[in-house]
Image (tube, helix red, strand yellow):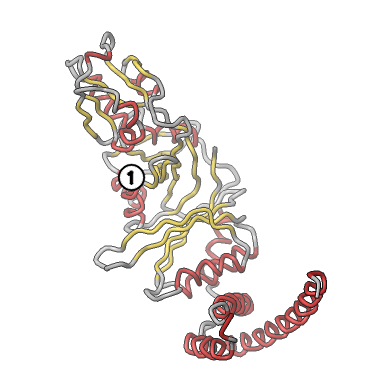
Amino acid sequence: MSTGEYRKQIDEIDDQIISLFAKRMEVASHIAEEKKKNNLPVLDSKREREKLLDIIDKTPEEIKEYSPLLYSLIFEISRSYQNKIIGANDELTNKIKGAIEGTAQLFPDNVSVACQGVEGANSQIACDKLFKYPRILYFSNFEAVFSAIEKGLCRYGVIPLENSTAGSVNSVYDLMMEHKFSIVRSIRAKITHNLLVKPGTKLEDIKVIYSHEQAINQSSVFLSTLKNVQIIPCENTAVAAKKVSESTDNSVAALASIQCMKYYGLECLKESVQNTDNNYTRFICISKNLEIYPGADRTSIMLTLPHEPGSLYKMLSRFYALDINLIKLESRPLPNKEFEFMFYFDLETPVYSPKFLQLMGELPSICDSFQYLGSYNEVI
């Protein structure tokens, strides 16, 4: 037979599959009604395991490895459909709906904001892009920023989450497991590192350079050209600039922003010494309360999964089944647990989408632990 004739056969088989799939989902809906009536969970692990083994036994040897993949996805779709009928976890979906209705239409201009570092820090620069007239309080470390939000000292906090060249800020992800907060907005800010010195200092005078560890890593190519220069990490780039401005030694320099040059009365010997010009840091704006502003099209969640084969695959299958785009997946080891992880997801989906609310209703029931971090939009 020709290719066209084989394709015609496939079309006829697909018509039968669609019809049988519709019948299967109809029966699944009846099962969902029974589970709802008897207050039973959607997931029946024992039944699924037995069913999958039976399917494998019945599958011809040459395609046996593919049938578990197909039916695992069918099971996920079936559970999703049943959850939609039952209306799982109304508590979270109602909380999200309440936040959408209860949040102001406009993002505030004049509020108290917690940032790590000192004047001129990249967090402050990001803060100035998010708010017109922020009242900034500076804290010595990221944990203090989270604590300031939890204690109500500031309404918002601005925290760096990841860099386009250096990757994720792991310490922040670890702190996210320890604190309660909501993400209300994010921003991508272009970061440049500049060699700043006291007025009159020449390149050959420099013996010590201060900066944040990530800025040092991001400027490694330039730093490798300097001979007999000590590189000293410090809390952040603005602290480095402040150290230089307060020093009486003309042999010290800092890698920091042009804003720091202005704040601390320094000169710029070399502009944009970072390895790549495409250097962006993503910051999140956090709050104590859940606030969802108009236009929110990104959602962040954290969760742990059963420590068993296929648990992450089943989670990803759920996103696929609901046609929700996953744009970030980060994992961090759980303290005091060997080879177990907390997973962080960024999802691209409008907060108003019925599929999004369905997913938020389903996820808590299939995770060991689940934390909804908020829905928001990103400023570029």
Quadrant into which the C terminus falls? top right
Q: Give the amino acid type for the residue marked by disc 1 in the picture.
A: Val
Q: Circle 1 is placed at which residue position?
A: 145
Examine the rendered structure and indicate whether residue 8 appears above or below residue 46: above
Lateral position of residue 340 relative to residue 45, left or right: left
Lateral position of residue 235 relative to residue 132, left or right: left
Which residue: 42% across, 75% down? 309
Examine the rendered structure and indicate whether residue 312 appears above or below residue 193: below
Which residue: 31% across, 31% down? 237
Which residue: 33% across, 67% down? 340
To which quarter of the image does residue 31 belong?
bottom right
Examine the rendered structure and indicate whether residue 48 appears above or below residue 300: below
- Nearest the viewer among 217 and 146 is 217
To which quarter of the image does residue 227 belong?
top left
Lateral position of residue 276 relative to residue 119, left or right: right
- Nearest the viewer among 311 and 346 is 311
Across and down, in percent, residue 35 comes to: 57, 88
> Dot 1, how many residues are within 10 Å of its Cα: few (below 14), some (14-19), or many (20+)?
many
